[in-house]
Image (spheres, grey):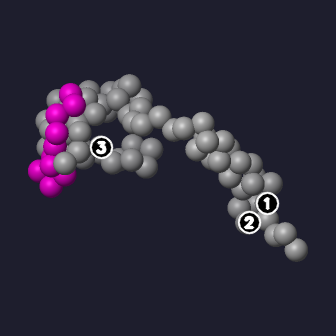
Amino acid sequence: MVKDPVCGMEVKESSAAAVLEHKGQMFYFCALSCYDAFEKNPDKYSFGKKESWWTRFLNRLAQANREAYGGKAPKCH
């Protein structure tokens, strides 16, 4: 079971009225009206869980490494 991001209703993935992928995350909707509301303003409903400061730091560090090393891992030797 997952939660409809618009109304908060619990939805079974297999019986969702609509499904949408947004920024790599899947969203399931109990009704087409919820799907339409989400589609009009997805950022209003797709906030999800907030990342911890440590996760944000690690993501920024990983991004800096990708930029500095062209997507390859740095070598220590």
Give the left or right position of residue 74, taking residue 22 as reference: right
**Circle nearer the viewer, 1 or 2:** 2
Which residue corresponds to mark 3? Answer: 27
Give the left or right position of residue 36, taking residue 45 as reference: left
Q: CA distance from mark 1 to mark 3?
A: 34 Å
Which residue corresponds to mark 2? Answer: 73
The label shown at residue 69 is 1
At label 2, the amino acid type is: Ala
Q: Is 15 within the magenta?
A: yes
Q: Residue at x 41, y 32 (%)?
A: 47
Residue nearest the observer in this picture, 45 or 60: 60
Asked if labels 2 and 3 touch by Cβ distance under 8 angstroms, the answer is no
Q: Is residue 36 visible?
A: no
Residue 32 drawn above or below residue 25? above
Residue 24 drawn above or below residue 47? below
Q: Circle 1 sits in a helix, a strand or a loop, which is it?
A: helix
**Circle nearer the viewer, 3 or 2:** 2
First in residue order: circle 1 vs circle 3? 3
Q: Position of residue 44 (x, y in %)?
A: 38, 25
**What is the quadrant of the C terminus in the image?**
bottom right
Instruction: Give the magenta part as a residue range.
Output: 7-16
Q: Residue at x 84, y 69 (%)?
A: 76
Asked if labels 2 and 1 touch by Cβ distance under 8 angstroms, the answer is yes
At label 3, the amino acid type is: Phe
First in residue order: circle 3 vs circle 2? 3
Q: Position of residue 43 (x, y in %)?
A: 41, 29
Q: Position of residue 30 (x, y in %)?
A: 15, 38
Q: Circle 3 sits in a helix, a strand or a loop, which is it?
A: strand
